[in-house]
Image (spheres, coloured by chain):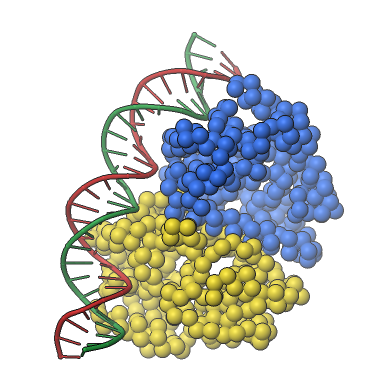
Chain colours: A yellow, B blue, C green, D red
Amino acid sequence: MKQLAQEAAAINKASPPCPTCVEWQCGLGSLLTADESRQIAAISTRRHITPGAELMPDSDLHESCVALLRGVVKVSRLLADGRQQIVSLKAAPDLLGAPFAPPGDVSIRAVTEAEIYCVPRHAFESIVLQNRSLEHRLHLRALEDLCEAETLLLTLGRKTARERIATFLLEMTGRFRAVEAGKRCGEGVEPGTLDLPLTRAEIGDFLGLTFETVSRQFAALRREGMIEFSDARRVLVRDRTRLRVAAGC
Amino acid sequence: MKQLAQEAAAINKASPPCPTCVEWQCGLGSLLTADESRQIAAISTRRHITPGAELMPDSDLHESCVALLRGVVKVSRLLADGRQQIVSLKAAPDLLGAPFAPPGDVSIRAVTEAEIYCVPRHAFESIVLQNRSLEHRLHLRALEDLCEAETLLLTLGRKTARERIATFLLEMTGRFRAVEAGKRCGEGVEPGTLDLPLTRAEIGDFLGLTFETVSRQFAALRREGMIEFSDARRVLVRDRTRLRVAAGC
DNA sequence: CGGGTCATTGATGCTCATCAAGCACAGTGG
DNA sequence: CCACTGTGCTTGATGAGCATCAATGACCCG
């Protein structure tokens, strides 16, 4: 149990072989072509971010976009008294603080270790304006993000704590499928196993709950046999069907 | 008190002189040029919708986009058991079911009387692909919608009922400034007066509350002198400053 | 008039936040 | 090597906030 956690941690620390920098050189997932990636890399500065740290020296987000090379980050909105709501989770390879996006007062923090490119916003926007097909892809991405945000709205506005947790687990499956030590993506791990990059408190900030409620609802689903923990961060989904019922849709 | 309500109703029923059809002919607010409006109108069918009715004979939304000429509509996501969350409110002139948007299972219903153009999606998308600047404007609009959705996420995830209602009132001010009978936009009405197009239940569906809670929180803000009702749907914001405090930000 | 929708208000109870205690583990420095 | 401290997680006890259920009034329309 402890073993597993340490192995997972080790993976997160050593740059793994398969993932995201490679994808970047091939073009940021499906978003950029290899050429466009190079073009953007050429005007960017690369930085390493430690977990919990803010990506940008504060309000530089108006000046820069961020290309996420490695790691997971959370995009939050804050209230004056410290309450926060995570509005989106981004895993490499992805783009944050999209070109042309209105200001909109968010805070972006690393969840895991992360590598980013800071791309000067104005230069990036110029590139996009000269590249019809790139703008089209960014436009599609924005519409997908909007659709995701609406899905989360339904969860926050109308679902119970139990339903939120079940929904969360279903959505995270696939996005954070567990990777076994030393192997390439996802072989040798029981299918349906999930390495959560988030703490209980962060899951709460994503689902509009307290960390205690998150913990209790996980425990309830575990007692009912739908999921199983080998470690607080490593979940096995045992019964996807019942979990879908528990998710209320 | 009754008088006012009847006048307001009369305005909603008679096509008013100043508003939205005119704007459409001048180009759907800032979104379309006059030429583009004509081009789109040419391939569209016009329809009238009564309050509460669904805009499209159901899942035709995959086939059509909607240009809203007049009226207010709500875009909702549904749960199997009937719970619903309004994810966005649109007032004419605006566009719904954006070109290139992923499917995403929403229901769109009229809040007031409404006039729409149904635009065949595929044809609309072709037009957009031949018009660089139009796609750019739609892209910007998508990013604004995303930003708005994120703001609502914070409200639903982290604010109390009281804060949600105060936030709602602040946001609706300006979007639904009251129009006095027979006059053009907004003269002769006490400034800060607001004609809510939504029922208490709809406000609840927007804010993730029940209609009883909406009603009680309105009553509380009224008792505290921040707002005043001349009619259940017509609100006067008396103290914007305290309302902002009550909104939690 | 009767039936429908919308709104208000009260009584009650459930869900989830809050407060609090304790455990496991990692990192630090004596 | 072992306290010491800090962080993350779990679990229990309590209470607040909001949902639910119910009754009533205002208005509209056929």
Quarter of the view holding residue B149: bottom right
Residue A112 placement (x, y as % from top left): 43, 77
Residue B85 visible somewhere in the drawing: no
* Residue closest to the far right: B35
Residue B41 placement (x, y as % from top left): 80, 48
**Relative height, residue A94 to residue C3 (above, below):** below
Seen at 52% across and 40% down, the residue is B203
Seen at 35% across and 54% down, the residue is A161
Quick one: quadrant of the N terminus of chain A? bottom left
Q: Nearer the viewer, residue B219 or B57?
A: B219
Q: Is residue D26 left or right of residue B13?
A: left
Q: Is residue A207 left or right of residue D7?
A: right
Q: Nearer the viewer, residue B198 or B115?
A: B198
Residue B104 placement (x, y as % from top left): 56, 56
Residue A49 visible somewhere in the drawing: yes
Q: Is residue B212 left or right of residue B27?
A: left
Seen at 33% across and 61% down, the residue is A211
Tag count: 0
Q: Is residue B70 left or right of residue C21?
A: right
**Relative height, residue A229 to residue D16 (above, below):** below
Q: Nearer the viewer, residue B241 or B55?
A: B241
Q: Nearer the viewer, residue A98 or B218?
A: B218
Residue B38 placement (x, y as % from top left): 83, 50
**Relative height, residue A18 to residue D5 (above, below):** below
Seen at 59% across and 61% down, the residue is A104
